[in-house]
Image (cartoon, rainbow, N blue to C red):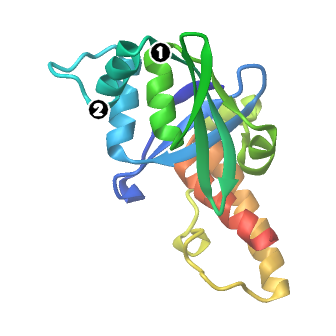
């Protein structure tokens, strides 16, 4: 996976969506991360060096001081809407792995120029397929923003079957809209709500 970018919205409460893009495909994976982790990733992507090492720079320096390098990071689990990752190290020829949050793993991966991998089942479950034609059309015309009633957080209870089906259709339409607008944070929330409704 490649890092496509970071996106946020005024209603995000300080959270960002980190967008991963398939290197040889058209699916994208949005992962909600905190402000600090987003800053750590953005600074490295922009080659901005702070006057003192930030946490992930310090982690890189410590790892390197033990003649160890990060070989790859692997997002390998998705449980109840939470992503899990592993960092693979090479320590003088010995392979080691460490559990990690995806945001920390990716912040380290870009500091070591290490590849980022995601399990196929996670892409199948949580990935969003990007449509180049839809993206081109969205640049030419604005897509209407969905009403507050269509927000994925607006209902915590499972609606009856008939309204459940109509809600699924409405959310699928809103998901297409969010992708067209490249609002991946909103798309991720809608995707999670769809998965919950579909069981």
Query: Left of 53 or right of it: where is 141?
Result: right
What is the number of callouts on the image? 2
Cα–Cα gap, marks 2 and 1: 17 Å
Percent x, y of residue 86: 60, 36
In the rendered structure, find residue 55 and report the number of the disc placed on it. 2
- Is 193 or 59 nearer to us in this picture? 59
Res 85 seen here: yes
Closest to the observer, 140 or 74:
74
What's the mark number on residue 21?
A: none
Q: Residue at x 60, y 81 (%)?
A: 156
Towards the viewer: 63 or 185: 63
Which quarter of the figure has residue 179?
top right
Q: Compared with residue 152, is residue 77 higher up or lower down, i.e. above or below?
A: above
Residue 132 relative to residue 68: left or right: right
As drawn, 27 above or below 34: above
Give the quarter of the figure containing the C terminus: bottom right
Q: Secondary structure at mark 2?
A: helix
Q: Could you say where residue 43 lies in the image, as x and y percent from the top left?
A: 33, 24
> Which residue has dot 1 on it?
68
Please tell me whether residue 19 is drawn above or below residue 58 in the rendered image: below
Between marks 2 and 1 in the image, the one whose residue lies nearer the viewer: 1
Residue 134 image offset from top left, x and y in percent? 72, 36
Image side of residue 110 versus residue 34, left or right: right
Task: Give the residue at the far left of this rendering.
Answer: 51
Q: Secondary structure at mark 1?
A: strand
First of labels 2, 1 by sequence position: 2
Q: Which residue is pictured at 45% across the width and 36% down the height?
A: 104
Do we see residue 143 in this rendering? no
Viewer-proximal residue among 157 and 177: 157
């Amino acid at each position: 996976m490649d890092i496509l970018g970071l996106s946020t919205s005024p209603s995000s409460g300080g959270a960002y969506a980190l967008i991963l893009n398939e290197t040889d495909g058209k699916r994208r994976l949005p992962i909600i991360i905190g402000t600090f982790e987003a800053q750590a990733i953005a600074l490295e992507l922009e080659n901005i060096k702070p006057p003192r090492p930030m946490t992930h720079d310090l982690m890189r320096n410590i790892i390197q001081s033990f003649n160890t390098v990060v070989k790859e990071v692997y997002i390998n689990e998705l449980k109840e809407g939470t992503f899990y990752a592993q960092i693979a190290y090479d320590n003088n020829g010995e392979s080691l792995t460490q559990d990690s949050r995806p945001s920390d793993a990716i912040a380290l991966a870009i500091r070591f120029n290490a590849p980022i991998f995601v399990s196929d089942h996670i892409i199948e479950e949580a990935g969003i397929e990007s449509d180049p034609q839809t993206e081109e059309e969205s640049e030419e015309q604005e897509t209407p923003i969905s009403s507050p009633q269509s927000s994925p957080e607006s209902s915590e209870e499972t609606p009856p079957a008939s309204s459940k089906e109509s809600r699924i259709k409405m959310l699928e339409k809103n998901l297409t809209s969010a992708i067209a607008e490249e609002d991946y944070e909103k798309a991720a929330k809608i995707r999670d709500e769809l998965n919950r409704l579909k069981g």
